Every structure is written in C-alpha cells, then in structure tokens.
Image: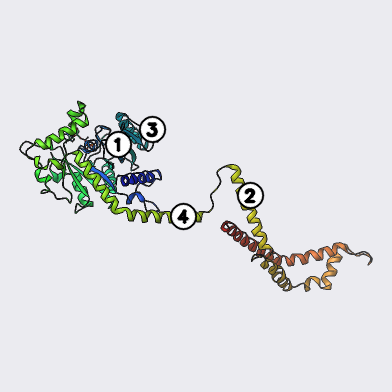
Amino acid sequence: MENLISLVNKIQRACTALGDHGEESALPTLWESLPAIAVVGGQSSGKSSVLESVVGKDFLPRGSGIVTRRPLVLQLHRIDEGREYAEFMHLPRKKFTDFAAVRKEISDETDRETGRSKAISTVPIHLSIYSPNVVNLTLVDLPGLTKVAVDGQPESIVQEIENMVRGYIEKPNCIILAISPANQDLATSDAIKISREVDPKGDRTFGVLTKIDLMDKGTDAVEILEGRSYKLQFPWIGVVNRSQADINKSVDMIAARRREREYFQSTPEYSHLASRMGSEYLGKVLSKHLETVIKSRIPSLQSLINKTILDLEAELSRIGKPVATDAGGKLYMIMEICRAFDQTFKEHLDGIRAGGDKIYGVFDNQLPAGLKRLQFDKHLSIDNVRKLITEADGYQPHLIAPEQGYRRLIESCLVTIRGPAEAAVDAIHALLKEMVHKSISETMASP
Ligand SMILES: Nc1nc2c(ncn2[C@@H]2O[C@H](COP(=O)(O)OP(=O)(O)OP(=O)(O)O)[C@@H](O)[C@H]2O)c(=O)[nH]1
C-alpha cells in the first residue's frame, strides 16, 4: 500500500512539471483527480506547527504577516534507514540535509515566483522529505486565511487567499485538514467556516484542534474532541504543539512529541482519549485514510489516464510527424516536403490526379466560345481595311506589302480579343490556385 502513495506522489510531480496544478486546462486535469490532503486554517492557528510535528522537523518559514504565499506540496516518504533529507522538485539532484536551508529555499523560491511584493501565487512548490520518522503522506500547505492585508499588500489579497484555498478544497478528491485553535471559540474558526461551505456533511474533513494547552483554566476541549460541539464523520484530533517560547528555546521535535504524549496521558480530562490524540497519531490516521481513498480512486484514475493518452495520441497524429531539431534535419525535411508537393502538383497537371483537365476545358471550350462571340466584321470591312492601310502606309505600288497597315489591323483585332483572353487567364489562375491548395493538403496528409 505504501507504494500507492509514492505512485500518486510521482504523478503529482509529473503534473506540476507539465504545468497542471488544477487550473483551467483544455484537457481534464489529472491533478484534480489525485487525492491530496490540504491544510487549511486561519493565520496563527498552528498550521505550520501541525505540519512540522507530523514531519518531526523544523523546516517551514516563520514570520509575521502572510508567510506562506504559494501552495507547498509536501510529500513525505518513509525510508527504512539512513539520514533524513529533503529535495525540491525545482532543484533536482540537490539533497538538503540541513532543514534550516530547506526553510530558506522555500522563502527564496516563493520570492522567485511572486517577487518580493508579498503577492501570492497558485503555482505550488514541491518538497519531498525522506525520513525514517515519517509516514508516507502528501500534504498541501496553503496560505493562512486572513481578514486584513498587511505590509502594504493590496486589500484583494484577503479574497485571493480565500479563493486559492477554496480552489483546492472544493475538489471532491481533496481531504481537508481543518486547523482550529482551542483557545478561540470554534464558531469563529476560519477553517471550519470554509470547510463547512465545501463539505457540509464533513465527509472529507479532519478537524484538528491546536493550542489545547493554552485554554483558559477551568475549560477543556472534551466536548469538541468527542464530537459533541461540532460533528464530523472522522473523530476530532487534538494536538499540543511547541509554544513560541519552546521554539525560541529550540526544543526539538522529538522531545516535543514526547511531551505532547505525556500531556494527553497525564491530563485527567483527556486521558481516556490519549490513544487517539497527538501529531504522531494524526500522521498515521491521515496516511491510512489517504491509502484508502487512493485505492478507491484507482479505477477512475486509470480510465482518466487512458482517456488522456488517447486524446493526446489523436492530437499528435493530427499534428503530424515529428520535426527534426538540427538545421540539417530541418532542411532535409523541407526539401522532402517540396519534392512531394512538386510531384503531387505535377500529377494534377498531367491528369493523373483530378483538376488538370479543367485547364484544357478553358482552352478548348471557354476561350473559343468567347472569341466566336466577338464582332470582327466592322474591323475587317473593306472600307476600314482601306482606311487603316492608307493612313499607315500612304499610297504605294501594289508590289510592296502594306506592313504598317497590317499591323494596325492586327492590333485593333487583338484589343478586341483582350476580354475573352483575360477571362481565360483568370479562370486558369483560379484552377491553378485550387490545385496548389489541393496539392498542399494531399502532401501533408501523405504518410
Ligand atoms: N502553546 C502552544 N502554542 C502553539 C500551539 N500551536 C501553535 N502554537 C504557537 O502559535 C504560534 C503560531 O503557530 P504557527 O504554527 O506558526 O501558526 P500558523 O497557522 O502556521 O500561522 P501562519 O504561518 O502565520 O499562518 C506559534 O508561536 C506557535 O508556537 C500549541 O498547540 N500550543
């Protein structure tokens, strides 16, 4: 089953490399059919902390304002042994073993796409983490939902983030990880609000409650965790992440996970729920659920891939043979096309293919018929001949041919036949053009 998640990971990477990340496209987008888990929450709800706890590493950029400005597709791969490392799809063959450098690269790559303007972009960053301490999982980290723009960002950014988040989570294949902080009223949770809009029955929403340790004294989250305040199909999972003070003191993740476990076991209100609380448990549940979803989607994925292959093959055969890349190859190809065109055109003229016979039709029928309709009587009347010859040559003895006069006579007749002659030329021009077009399409269609 673990192979299934890695297979989907590979397809997701291929989608991004081909520019398919679920946006408008002429072809059905494969990305949209792949199951993935999107992490949704308001700013400072603890999204980054949950992601880092699931991974067991510090690697996400931190700061004030909108830090996550591009979707981060985080693919976790479990390895049996060896040192953990990370890889970005935009930096192939570069292995990061220093996770502070991973954090910096996420920031830098965000800026490369969006500029330093703090704008947001829907083009995802792909990060793969290979570690013995993770479960196979694909998570998409999205910008935190916010209510106000900061740092000179346009007001529209609030709506843009919401649209981007909605764009991911409204896809029926998206599993929503809705992060809500326990120290705020659940009724005000941005994550619950938006996930309820796209998944009203909670069929694909996992509710995660953070900051349970920060709740007011005398209050607890049992009502929520037991699904009585807000029911989802899947049980709520509570987590206790590192506080800001822990982060400042560089409390490591492994110690934080241990402390989290102890917290749930030793707090009387939660001890009966301890076995299904915490980030480690969350990671396992998500991995298992993702596997189940992928398994159920395999037939539809397969038929989508097959259909896309057929569509692309049809498109390829419509486009034609591959074009050579080097100059010599291109020249050879052009010469071949010209030769084939030349041959086809000649065959049309010679009557091997249809079309050339129409040219004979013009000379044999149209032109003679046009000429027959002309009135030469006036030109060739004896009076006119005499007049022209006298005007051109003057009075001459009969032995000398009146050459100038003949010329004038022929010229005036030629002017008369101009009309039918030009009509014949136009007709042949149109026929030749038609044959050129025919020959081009026949040349391109020939194998
Ligand atoms: N005590 C305690 N602090 C937490 C918990 N979860 C998160 N925090 C703290 O809350 C602050 C915000 O957490 P983040 O994980 O950065 O929240 P975020 O949702 O990713 O915030 P943005 O990146 O700004 O959108 C940090 O200082 C965390 O240390 C928790 O369960 N308990």
How far apart are labels 1 and 3 at the CA level? Answer: 21 Å
Name the spot of residue 261 as percent of width and height, x first: 15, 36
How far apart are labels 4 and 2 at the CA level? Answer: 27 Å
Closer to the camera: disc 1 or disc 4? 1
Q: Is residue 269 left or right of residue 349?
A: left
Q: Is residue 399 left or right of residue 195?
A: right
Amino acid carrying label 1: it is Asp
Amino acid carrying label 4: it is Glu
Q: Is mark 2 within 8 Å of ligand 1?
A: no
Q: Which tag, 1 or 4, sits closer to the chain's start?
A: 1
Relative to residue 120, is residue 361 depicted above or below? below
Relative to residue 83, is residue 393 depicted above or below? below
Instruction: State the residue position of label 2.
Output: 335
Instruction: State the residue position of label 3.
Output: 94
How far apart are labels 2 and 3 at the CA level? Answer: 45 Å
Instruction: State the residue position of label 4.
Output: 313
Judged from the image, the secondary structure of the residue bearing numbered disc 4 is helix
Residue at 31 percent across and 28 percent down: it is: 98
Is 175 or 349 nearer to us in this picture? Answer: 175
Name the spot of residue 274 as percent of width and height, x first: 12, 40
Relative to residue 347, is residue 214 depicted above or below? above
- The disc at residue 80 is 1
Judged from the image, the secondary structure of the residue bearing numbered disc 1 is loop
Amino acid carrying label 3: it is Lys
Q: Which tag, 4 or 2, sits closer to the chain's start?
A: 4
Closer to the camera: disc 1 or disc 2? 1
Amino acid carrying label 2: it is Met
Residue at 36 percent across and 56 percent down: it is: 303
How far apart are labels 1 and 4 at the CA level? Answer: 40 Å
Q: Residues within 10 Å of mark 1 (few under 14, many from 20)?
A: few
Q: Residues within 10 Å of mark 3 (few under 14, many from 20)?
A: few
